[in-house]
Image: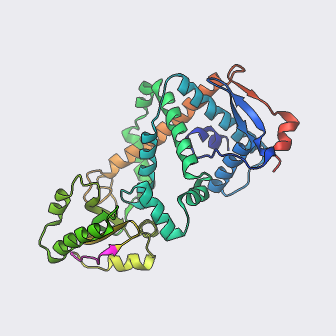
């Protein structure tokens, strides 16, 4: 539990207002730049968010640790702001869109992701985000912004030390030896996917993609030429995607496992039908099929990729080492910041215990 809380600054959380007057009670105040209260409602939302990830209730002592993590988070963010560290809303939106694009398996806008959630799950984006993280979209973006500010602040003073976290050759090979049975390439399809956004003129978009679809269907234009032709076109995406024969791929594509199986049964060169979604028109062409296999340390991690398993493991281990390094750096920073001049606990002892008894 203590390790879980130690990295809380770099994990997910929630900040929102409370309808109940009792939940507005401040538990602590952080005051490096300006007084900022941490309320009972904010703590409840953070605990709720963690419970969604953990799937279990927290004890009284664990709730206190989460409260401490909240205090530490605000201390670091305010210290970063005092040092002039800033993150723009544009940077936050880019980070958010990058995250949802990874979930979708292709580049999407926030509006496209919201439309997909509504179509597939019958939820608004806020409802989906609240169910997943305990925050609505705006709250999650504010949380991302705080995390980005805090991380930049922590990293700024320890760049040289951070660069020394690279894994050794022995660590990489030992990791492969232990995990080689898990390093498997699933059966994979390489699809050439063409998507055009409907935008403000769906009729014009339909005509445009119908023309491209006809070219692909008749084999008049090579697919790579299509990709080059539409490079830089904000409304049209044309390029290769890789689809693994896994339940996760079916979920990302928004289709059933049975439909995924039908996709893998298609022949090389097969052109799909023209598909309409609430936000775009699209079709795909099956370009190549790759069999499942165990990966050797010198194999590429994905067909047509240049990244081999060795480099992939090195990157993964480096990220893990950096995460541990940053967690320790956060801990060191907050120890120095937790002074009476910087924060005050407003509820302690039995009074705090009573408020955390829910």
Residue 332 pos. (x, y %): 59, 26
Q: Check the image and report above or below for 204 versus 155.
A: below
Residue 233 pos. (x, y %): 24, 55
Give me the residue at 57% from left, 44% from top.
Answer: 11
On-image quarter of the N terminus: top right
In this view, which residue lies farthest toward the top? Answer: 341
Q: Check the image and report above or below for 49 versus 203.
A: above
Residue 69 pos. (x, y %): 66, 37
Residue 283 appears in which quarter of the rendering? bottom left
Q: Is residue 154 visible?
A: yes
Q: Is 30 situated left or right of 203 in this image? A: right
Depth check: give the residue in front, 210 or 337.
Answer: 210
Give me the residue at 70% from left, 36% from top.
Answer: 38
Q: Is residue 274 magenta?
A: yes
Which region is colored magenta?
Answer: 269-275
Q: Is 226 situated left or right of 338 in this image? A: left
In this view, which residue lies farthest toward the right? Answer: 350
Q: Is residue 317 magenta?
A: no
Residue 145 pos. (x, y %): 51, 39
Give me the residue at 55% from left, 42% from top.
Answer: 142
Q: Is residue 103 visible?
A: no
- Kindly report the secondary structure that dominates the magenta region of the rendered protein: loop
């Amino acid at each position: 539990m203590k390790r879980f809380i130690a990295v809380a600054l770099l994990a997910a959380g929630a900040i929102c207002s409370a309808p109940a007057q009792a939940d507005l009670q401040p538990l602590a105040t952080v005051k490096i730049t300006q007084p900022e209260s941490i309320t009972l409602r904010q703590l409840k939302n953070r605990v709720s968010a963690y419970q969604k990830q953990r799937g279990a209730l927290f004890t009284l002592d664990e709730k206190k640790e989460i409260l401490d993590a909240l205090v530490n988070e605000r201390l670091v963010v305010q210290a970063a702001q005092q040092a002039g560290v800033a993150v723009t809303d544009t940077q936050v939106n880019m980070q958010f869109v990058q995250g949802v694009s990874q979930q979708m398996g292709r580049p999407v806008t926030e509006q496209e992701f919201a439309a997909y959630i509504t179509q597939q799950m019958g939820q608004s984006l806020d409802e989906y985000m609240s169910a997943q993280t305990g925050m609505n979209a705006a709250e999650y973006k504010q949380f991302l912004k705080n995390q980005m500010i805090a991380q930049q602040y922590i990293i700024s003073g320890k760049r040289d030390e951070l660069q020394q976290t690279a894994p050794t050759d022995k660590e990489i090979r030992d990791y492969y030896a232990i995990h080689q049975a898990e390093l498997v390439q699933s059966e994979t399809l390489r699809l050439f996917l063409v998507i055009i956004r409907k935008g403000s003129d769906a009729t014009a978009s339909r005509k445009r993609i119908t023309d491209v679809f006809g070219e692909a269907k008749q084999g008049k234009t090579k697919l790579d030429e299509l990709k080059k032709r539409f490079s830089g076109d904000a409304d049209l995406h044309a390029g290769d995607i890789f689809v693994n024969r896994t339940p996760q791929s079916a979920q990302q594509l928004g289709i059933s496992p049975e439909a995924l199986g039908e996709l893998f049964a298609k022949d090389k060169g097969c052109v799909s039908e023209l598909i309409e979604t609430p936000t775009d028109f699209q079709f795909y062409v099956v370009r190549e099929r790759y069999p499942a296999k165990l990966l050797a340390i010198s194999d590429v991690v994905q067909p047509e990729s240049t990244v081999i398993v060795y480099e992939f493991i090195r990157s993964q281990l480096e990220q893990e080492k950096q995460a541990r390094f940053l967690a320790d750096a956060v801990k060191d920073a907050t120890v120095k910041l937790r002074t009476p001049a910087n924060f005050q606990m407003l509820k302690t002892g039995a009074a705090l215990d009573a408020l955390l008894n829910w």
